[in-house]
Amino acid sequence: MPELLVELFSEEIPARMQRQASEDLRKLVTDALVEQGLLYEGAKGMATPRRLSLVVHGLIGRQPDRREERKGPRVDAPQKAIDGFLAAAGVTLEQCVVQEDRKGAFYVARIEKPGRPSEEIIAEVMPAVIARFPWPKSMRWGSGSLRWVRPLHSIICSFDGEAVPFAIDGVTVGRTTRGHRFMAPESFDVRRQEDYERELKRHKVIIDPEERQDVIRNAARNLAFAQGLTLIEDEALVAENAGLTEWPVVLMGSFDPSFLDVPPEVIITSIKAHQKCFALRDGNGRLANRFLLVANLEAEDGGHRIIEGNNKVIAARLSDAKFFWDQDRKMPLEEMAARLEGVRFHEKLGTMADKVRRIAALAGEVAQLVGADTGKAREAARLAKADLVSGMVGEFPELQGLMGRYYALDQGLGQEVAEAIGAHYKPQGPSDAIPPAKVAQAVAIADKLDTLVGFWAINEKPTGSKDPYALRRAALGIIRMVLEGGLRLPLSKLITKHQTHFAGAPEGLSSDLLSFFADRLKVHLREQGARHDLIDAVFSLGGQDDLWLIVRRVEALGRFLATDDGASLLAGVKRAGNILRIEEGRDGRSYTGAPDESLLRQPEEKALASAIAKAEDEAGRAVKAEDFEGAMRALAALRAPVDAFFDRVTVNADDLALRENRLKLLSRIRQSTQQVADFSRIES
C-alpha cells in the first residue's frame, strides 16, 4: 500500500513544543484524509529540533466514488427556485427523483461524485493543515503571511514515492531535505520512509525522538558505569535533551570538589536548570564532582572543547550557588521570616507573614488532633516560609522548603522542626510521598487548609478545568495525609474556626468547602478502585467530615455487600424503598414513625418488627463505636425476616390502618440501614 511522507523543515523548534506538535500534525492530517474518504493503516508523527515529520502507512491510492443526495424544493415550487436548486447542485431535472414526505412531493438531486486521486486531496489538505497549525506561539518572517513556530524553509510531501506539489507562501515543496546542521548540512532527496530515515541517519540525524532518548539514556548509564559512578536518573531531562539534539553525544565534565560543600540538591538543580546536565553519584552514594552533558555533534577533538566550555559555565553557576549558600546562612531564619511582611501572598489575602501567622495558629490545633508536638508544629509553621526571601530560593524557586530545612539544621533548630519546614509543601503531586512525621503533617495540613479556606473566603474557587492556585491539589494532599497517615480530623470544625481569620467570609463556606473535599475524595477513591455508588451511599447520609472514617465505612459496606446476606438484604431494602416511594408519592405524605405494635397481626410482621428493633439497637451501638463490620453483622440479621415479610404479608391491605402500619414498618427498615449508608444509592 502507498505511504505518505511529510517533513516540515524549519529553524529551531523549542524542545517543550515538539511532542505536542508531532501529535497535532498526525491528527490534523489523518483526520482531514479520513474526512475525504482516504483510509489508512497507521500513522506516526516525529520531531527533531529542526523538523516535524509524519509517515502515514497504507493510505489508499484513490478516493472511493461517492453518491450524494440533496433535497430540493417542492415540485410545485416557483420555477425560479427549482432552477436555482438545479444550478447549485450541478444537475438537470432529469437527474432528480421525486420523493414525498408529510409536507408533500419534492425533488431530490442524486449527485454521482467519482473519486479523485489521493495526490489531489493531499495537495489540498496539506496547505490547510500548515496554515492553521496550532503552535502555542508562532511568528511571521520575510514578506509572507504564513505563521510558523520559526521560519519554515522547506517541505517534503511524498506520496507513493512521488512528490505532491502544492504552493504555500513561497516555501519550497518537494522531496528534498537537509542533514545535520554542522556534520552533514548538504541537501538530498528522499522518496519513502525507509530511505528517509536511512538517509537522515547517514547525514547524522535520528528522526525518532524515542530512539534519541534511548541513545542518551544508554550512553549516560554506560559512561557513568565506566567511571565507577551512577547516573541520577531524570526522564524529564532525557526527553529535554532529546528535544535539543538531532545527533546526541554524551560527554562527561567535572567541577571543583570544593563545591560539594553546597547541599547536593542545589548542585543537581543548578547544573540541570542552567546546562541541562545530569548529576552523578560515586560508589558510596554521595554526589560526585562529575556531570554528564549531551552535545549535538561528534566533535573532532573527542569533545574536549565542549567539555571545557561546560566546565567553565558549570563552575560559574556553582560559584553563584555557593555564594547564595554562604550568604543565606549568615541570616537567622527568624530574620528571614520577619522580611515576609514585605512579600505579598495575594492581593485579597494579605502578606506572606499574614499567612504564616494563620498557619502557625492552625498547625497547633492540628498537631493536638494528630498527636504531634504542638510547640514544634507552631515553630516549624512560623519558619516554614522564611526561605522564600533567601538568595538561593530567589535563584531556584523549586528549592523552597528544602533550603529552609538546611538553614534550620545549620542554625540548630532541631531535627523535627527542620524536617517539617522541608516537607510542609508535600505531597506536591500524586506520585509524591506524604510528610513522614506528625509535626510535618500538622504543618502541611495547616498550610494547605489555610490556602483553601482563604481562597474560598474571597470566592476564588476552581471552575471547570481552571485551577490557577492548585486548590484541587491542596485538597487531595490533605486527603492523602489523612488516609495514608490514619489521621482523624473534624474538618468541618477546623474550617469553621479558621474562617474567622478572613473578614467577610461568606455564609456556608464550611459546607461548601466540605463538599469540595467530598468531591475530591470521591475522585481519589474511584481511582483507587472503590465503587462510586458505595461512596455516594455513604456521603448522602450528610454531616460526614471525618475522611478516614468515611473510607472505613465504604470499605466495610463493600465487603458486606459482597456476601449473600448483604446482597439479599440490599434487595429487600430496595424493595421496601420502592414501595414506600410509590405509596408516599400517591398519598402525598411520609410514613416515618414507629409502627403500632397492636396492629401487627401476622407472625411475619411481628418477627420483622422485633428484628428491626434489635438490629437497629445493635447497629447503632456498633456505629457509635466505629465498628462498621459489627453494624453490618447486625443488619444482616434482617435478611430472613425481611424475605419472610415480603413473601407472606400484603402491604397494601384493604384495612387502611393495617396498610399504614405496614408502610411504617418498611420505613423502619430504611431508617435502620441508614445508620450505615443510604441503600437506595447502591446499584444492585
Image (spheres, helix red, strand yellow):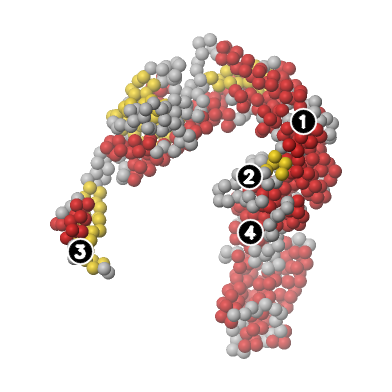
> Is residue 411 shown above or below 565?
above
Q: In front of the other: label 4 or label 1?
A: 1
Pointer 4 or 3: first along the chain: 3
- Nearest the viewer among 568 and 170 is 170
**Residue visible at 31% across and 44% down in the picture:** 36
Q: Which residue is mark 1?
A: 406
**Mark closer to the observer (2, 4):** 2
Quadrant assignment for the C terminus: bottom right
Percent x, y of residue 242: 52, 27
Report which residue position mark 3 lands on. 77
The residues tagged by marks 4 and 1 sit, at their Cα atoms, a distance apart of 42 Å
Label 3 or label 1, whichever comes before in sequence order = 3
Amino acid type, label 2 = Ala
Marks 2 and 3, the one that precedes in the sequence: 3
2 or 3: mark nearer the eye: 3
Task: Determine whether 575 is above or below 400 in the image.
Answer: below
Q: CA distance from mark 1 to mark 2?
A: 26 Å
> Is residue 203 shown left or right of residue 673?
left
Label 4 secondary element: helix
- To which residue does mark 2 refer? 470
Which residue has dot 4 on it? 535
The type of residue carrying mark 3 is Ala
Dividing the picture into quadrants, the one containing residue 511 is bottom right
Query: Which is nearer the eye, 63 or 261?
Result: 261
* Mark 3: few/some/many CA within 10 Å (<14, 14-19, 20+): few
Label 2 and label 3: CA atoms lie apart by: 62 Å
Residue ID at (68%, 52%): 457
